[in-house]
Amino acid sequence: DIVMTQSPDTLAVSLGERATINCKSSQSILYTSNNKNSLAWYQQKPGQPPKLLIYWASTRESGVPDRFSGSGSGTDFTLTISSLQAEDVAIYYCQQYYRSPDTFGQGTKLEIK
Amino acid sequence: EVRLVQSGAEMKKPGESLKISCKGSGYSFANSWIGWVRQVPGKGLEWMGVIYPADSDTRYSPSFQGQVTISADKSISTAYLQCNSLQASDTATYYCAKRKAGIGWYFFDSWGQGTLVTVSS
């Protein structure tokens, strides 16, 4: 299985500041058919199902605020929230969908400092 | 509007079986992979498997292969997750989620509300 490792496990950021979450895959997840990385980011708030934020490592899902952005290549990927809002407090997960079984990172809990 | 509506919470005893459902609407149910994700209380997301309702092609995570059965009835746009011989460690919220249509577009773009399964004697 492809192992996805996120860092840090917990992140505390002040309102209005930048938040950066990292995700590393144990092997390449580059989908050669479109030359994009098969990497998605999800946001999960307490008591709610996960919500898709980003796919193909950097494509924002419709309706997701533009303060959320994804980047990365090879085996290293990043989710950035440019200016943290109170409603962004949540757990964030990366997921590779390159090879079955799809696998998730362990999650990063984002808090307000 | 895409909707995935799951069946309600369940309480089971160890050794019992369970079948939970997920009804899709607002999209072509038969032509989108639909999967199941487990979340143990306070823990992360675990990908269990997916099914393509049009032909019932099913893929399981090795971690769940043989422990669960994923099925779908495209005539009523409903997917199922069956778990046998439940143990306390199966206590979790189970989510269904659909993949975007298209080869390689395998991320989950819509999720059900979750079904809490509690296994206790």
Image (cartoon, grey):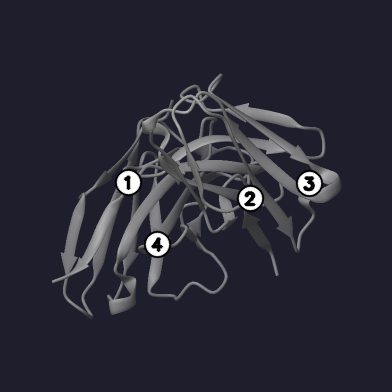
Q: Amino acid at mark 4?
A: Gly
Discs 2 and 3 lie in a common subunit: yes
Residue visible at 33% across and 76% down? A87
Q: Amino acid at mark 2?
A: Lys
**Residue A40 position within the rendered picture, expressed as x and y whole percent measured from the top left:** 47, 51
Residue B57 has which mark?
Answer: none
- Is residue B103 in view from this perspective? no
Chain identity of mark 1? A
Label 2 belongs to which residue? B98
Q: Do callouts 4 and 2 mark residues in contact (Cβ within 8 Å)?
A: no
Question: Badge 1 local density, few (<14 within 10 Å), some, or many (20+)?
Answer: many
Label 4 belongs to which residue? A47
Chain identity of mark 4? A
Residue visible at 38% across and 74% down? A67
Of marks 2 and 3, which one's residue comes earlier in the chain? 3
Whole-number angstrom distance, CA of label 1 to CA of label 4 = 24 Å
**Residue B82 position within the rendered picture, expressed as x and y whole percent measured from the top left:** 61, 33
Label 1 belongs to which residue? A23
Query: Quarter holding the N terminus of chain B?
Result: bottom right
Residue B31 has which mark?
Answer: 3
The secondary element bearing badge 4 is classed as: loop
Indicate left or right for A87 with B22 as reference.
Answer: left
The secondary element bearing badge 3 is classed as: helix
Q: Quadrant of residue B59?
A: top right
Whole-number angstrom distance, CA of label 4 to CA of label 3 = 29 Å
